[in-house]
Image (cartoon, coloured by chain):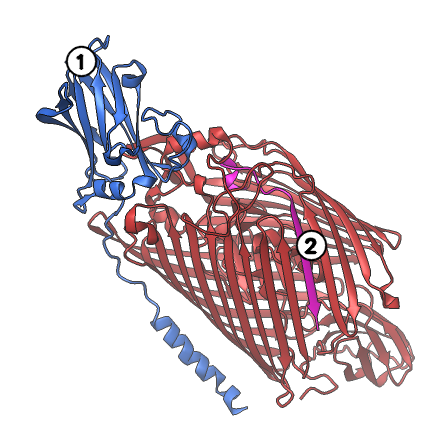
Chain colours: A red, B blue
Amino acid sequence: MIQKGGLFILCLAWVCISVQAQQCTLTLRGKILHLENNEPIEAAYVWLVESNKGVPSDANGNFILKDLCPGTFTLQIRFIGHKEINRSITLNASTTSQTFLMEEEAVDLAGVEVHGHQEVVQTTTSVSSLYGEALLQSRGESLGESLKRVAGVTTFSTGNTISKPVIHGLHSNRILILNNGIRLEGQQWGAEHAPEIDPFLADELTVIKGAETVRFGPEAMGGVILVNPPALPTSKKKITEINLIGNSNGESGNLALAHAGGSAKIPGLGYRLQGATKRAGNIRTPGYVQDNTGMQEMSLSSALGYSSKKLGAEVYYSYFSTTLGILRDSHTGNLTDLQQIIKNGRPFSEGEFSYAIDNPKQDVVHHLAKVKAHYHLQPSWKLNVQYGFQSNRRKEFDRRRGNLNARPSLDLELFTNTAEVSLDHQLKSQWTGSAGISLIQQANSNVPGTGVTPLIPNYDMFNAGMYLIEKYMKGPLEIEAGLRYDIRNIRAARYLGNQLEESNLQYQNGAAFLGAMYQVSPSLSLSSNLGTAWRPPNVNELFSQGLHHGAAAVELGDKNLSAENSLKWVNSLELDGKKGNLELTGYVNRIQNYIYLNPTGQTFVSLRGTFNVYEYLQANALFYGIDLSGSYGFGQQWEGYFKGSLIRAKNMETQAYFPFIPSDRMDVGLSYSFGKPEEGQGKNRITLSSLGVARQSREPDFDLAPAPPAYSLVNLGYSRKAQLGKNQFTASLLVTNLLDTEFKEYMNRFRYFTADMGRNIQLKLNYQF
Amino acid sequence: MNMFSKLPLYLLILLTLGFASCESNDPSEENDGEVITDVTLKFQELNASNALVGSVLSFKAIDPQGIEVGKTPTVQSISLTKGKKYQMTIEVTNSIKNEDITQEILAEAAEHQFFFLGPVFDSNIFSIQYADAGGIALGLKNTVTVSSSPGTNNSSMRVVLRHDLNKSFAGASNPNFSNFVQAGGETDLDITFPVILN
C-alpha cells in the first residue's frame, strides 16, 4: 500500500492559463509543504526529468525553474524522510504555480530531528512549539512548567505541584487544552485544579497565542495548547523510548516508556503504547521543608491507527491519575489564621522530608477515549469524523474530624462527550478550508456523602457550534478568515439547605476572525490576526455560594452574569537568519464583561471566626503586551538566547489592576557545544542561564499580601548526546536555582504562605532504540 | 477493509450511546458534617474542697444554620460571681444533624485543644487551668477562678478551638497561649463571649 508516487498526496493542480508561447521562456513556480501541517519544506530537490533541470526549495518551500519549453514533463520532488512525488506536468503558460504536499515516510533517521509530522493547526496567528531537544529538556515537568519555555506563557500555580498554564495573562477556562485533538474537559475553573494531562504522551507541545474560538469552540479566548502525540508508524518498524529522571529536591523519580510499531502484515496499521509514573516527596525551600507537598502520578496512553490511500482511522485512549499533597499550613480555618500565616511569611510547622501524602490532598483520575476517522471523498475533499469521551473524577480531602477525615469534602464526577464532523477542502492551490459542526455534552454530578454543601451544582451542559474557515494562499501571502456560531444550554440543580434550586440558562454567540501572513523575504515573515472569542460564565461563577474551605473566603456567584466577549489582535514578526532568529509578538485583547472575583471589603462572622467575602463581578478589561524571543550563534560552538514577556491588564471601568497577572520577566542563556557527532563522538553542551523576574508593581487594590520582591535565578545544565550503534542516548544534568536563592513568585498562590522551591539537581537519561 | 468501511456506522452507534448515557445525577441534600451550630459553656461552682456545689449556669453561642452567609451567630453573655471558683465544661453540638461533637473532640484529644484569651485574662479577671481527665491539655473541662476585685464588671473572653496542631509546641500547654497559631493547625471555633461580673 505504501509505494512510490503520490499516494495520499492531494493534487492541487491549478488550471493553467493558456498563453501562446512556443519559445523556451516558461517559468514553473511552486511551493513545497509538509502534507501533515503545511509547514514549508526547505531543501527539497525539484527535478524536471526531461529537461534535465533542477533546483532546491528555499526556506519557505518556494522554488523557481526558469527558461522552460512548453510540453509535458515529469516532475520529481525528493526530500529526505518523505515520499517522492512523481507527477506529469504540462507547461503551456508563461507562469505556472503549484503547491506540492509531501507526505512523511516512515524512515528512521537517527539523529535527524523530523519536526511536525502531526496535523498541526494551520493558522495565521502566532504559534510556538516545543519539540525535539527543547521538549526533551522539559521532560518530567508538568504541562504548565514545560510550557514556561515558550515566550508569553507563564504559570498560575498553587505550590510546586499544581500549575496551570497562563497565555498572555489568561488561564483556566479562558484557554483551551487539546489532548490529541480533543478538548480536555476537567474541573478547570478552580485555581488549584491543574490540567489533567501528562506531557509525556506528547512529542510536541504547541501554543497558539491568538483567539481561536472559531476552530475550537468557546473558551479559546487567550489561546490554545495542543498536546500532540507522535504520528503512528505506517510501516514495519519499531521504536522504543525510555526516560528516567531523578530530582534531588523532593527526591523524586520519574520513569516513562513509549513503544510504537507498525504491522508487517497490514501496511498502514500502526500502534503506540506509552506510560509514565512519578513519585515525589516533600519539597524543600532554601530554609525549610514544606510539609505535605509530595505527589504521585501515573499516566498511560495508547493508540491504534490505520491509514490507506483514502481512509485513515485512529482509536486513542489516555489515562491520567494523580494524588497531590497540599501544604498543610496553607489550609486555614478563618481570616485570623490566614493573616497570621501571611504575617509569619512561612509555614508555622517545621516540615520533615517524607513521601507520605496526608490531608489536605487531591485525588484526580481522568480517562479520555477517542475515535477518529477521515476519508478522502475526492482528491480535494476530505471528511473528518471525531468522537471523544472523557470522564473526570476529582476528590479533595481536607483535615476533618473523625471518620470524615477519610471522606472527600469535594467529590465531583464529570462526563464529557465531544463529537465533530468536518469537511476539508483544498480546491485549487490557493484555496483551502474547512467547515464543520461540533457538539459538546457534559454532565457534572456531586457524589453524595461528602458531608459538605457542594461548591458547584450538578449540571448538564450542551453546546452546539458550526464553523467555516477559508484560507487563500498565493506566493508569499496567506489570508485566512473564519466564522462560527455556538449555542449553549446549562441546566443546573442543587440543594441549598433543604431547598431545591434549579436553573436553566441559555447562551449563544458568534465568533469570527481574519488573519494574514506575509513572507517578506526568505528570512522575514509578518503575521497579523484579529479574532473574536466568547466564553459563557462558568458554573462556579454562576453558582458559588458559601465557604471556600481552606481559603478562609466566602465566595458569592451571580446567576445573572453574561458571557464574556473578547477581541484579540495578535501581530508577530519572525526573523529566521542563518546565524540566529528573532520572534516578536505584540497583542491587544479587549474583553467585555470580564468576570473576576472581587473582594467586597465585607467580612462574615461565624462561630468558626471571620471570613472575607468575595463576589463575582463583570467589567470591561484590556490586556496587552509583547513577547520577545531569539537566539544567536557565535561561531560553531557558542549560542546565546533570550526570551521575555510583558503583560498589562486593566479594569477599564475602575482603572484598577487585576490580581495574578504575571510580572515582567526575562530569561537569558548562553550555551557552549563541543564534540564531533559526525565522527561518532558524543555531542556535549553546557548551558548557563538566568531568569529575572520583576516585582509586580501593578497590584490590585486589594490583596492579602503585597507582591513579593523581584528575584533572579541561575540555572546550569550539561547534556551529552551519544550514538550507541544505531541507538541514541541522551544524558543531562541540570541544576535549577543553583545559588539556592529564596524567592516568592507572584503567580504562585502559596506565596502567601511559603517561599518557592530551592536548589534542585536533576539527572535525566533518555534512550531510544 | 470491510471493518473499516463500516466505521461510520460504529462511530454513530458509539456516539449515540455516549450521548445518551451521560446525564447528571439528581442532586441530594448534603448535611454539613463538620458544622458546629451550638457551643455551650457550663459553669458550676467549686467549694473550698473542690466539690461541685449549686446549680449549673449555661451560656450559649448559637448559629442554627452553621456557616451561612448573611446570618450572624447569637452569643450569650457569661454572668458569674466575683471571687468564686468554677468548673467550666464545654459542649459542642451540630443541631442540624443532632450530633454531639464533644465526643469527637474527646476521641481526637491529641489533635484538638481549646485556648482561652481576651481581656478577661489580660486584666487578670479570670484565671484558668485545664482540668480534663488524665491531665491532658484539651480544654473540654477547666477550672476558672474569678478575681474578687476585678476592677471592672464587664469584660470578654475569647474561646478558640484549634484542630491538627502540634500540642507539644513550646508554650502550647498554657490555656492562655496567645501564639497558638505558632503551633500549627487551623481554627475550628473562634467565639468571643461578653463577660458580666456580679
Question: Relative to A222, does residue A88 appear above or below in the rendering?
Answer: below
Q: Is residue A596 visible?
A: no
C-alpha separation, residue under disc 1 versus residue under disc 2: 85 Å
Q: Who's the residue at 83% across and 69% down the image?
A: A43
Nearer the observer, disc 1 or disc 2?
1
Name the residue tied to disc 1.
B83
For residue A116, the mark is: none
Q: Is residue A680 left or right of residue B73?
A: right
Question: Relative to A241, does residue B71 appear above or below in the rendering?
Answer: above
The kind of residue on which mark 2 rests is Ser
The magenta-colored residue range is A748-769
Name the residue tied to disc 2.
A527
Q: Residue B180: where, in percent of width, then height? A: 38, 29
**Chain of the residue under the numbered disc 1 shown in the image:** B
- Asked if residue A672 is among those painted magenta in the image, a careful observer would answer no
Q: Residue B198: where, in percent of width, then height? A: 14, 13
Quadrant in which the C terminus of chain A appears:
bottom right
Q: Who's the residue at 49% across and 51% down the image?
A: A172
Circles 1 and 2 on the same chain: no
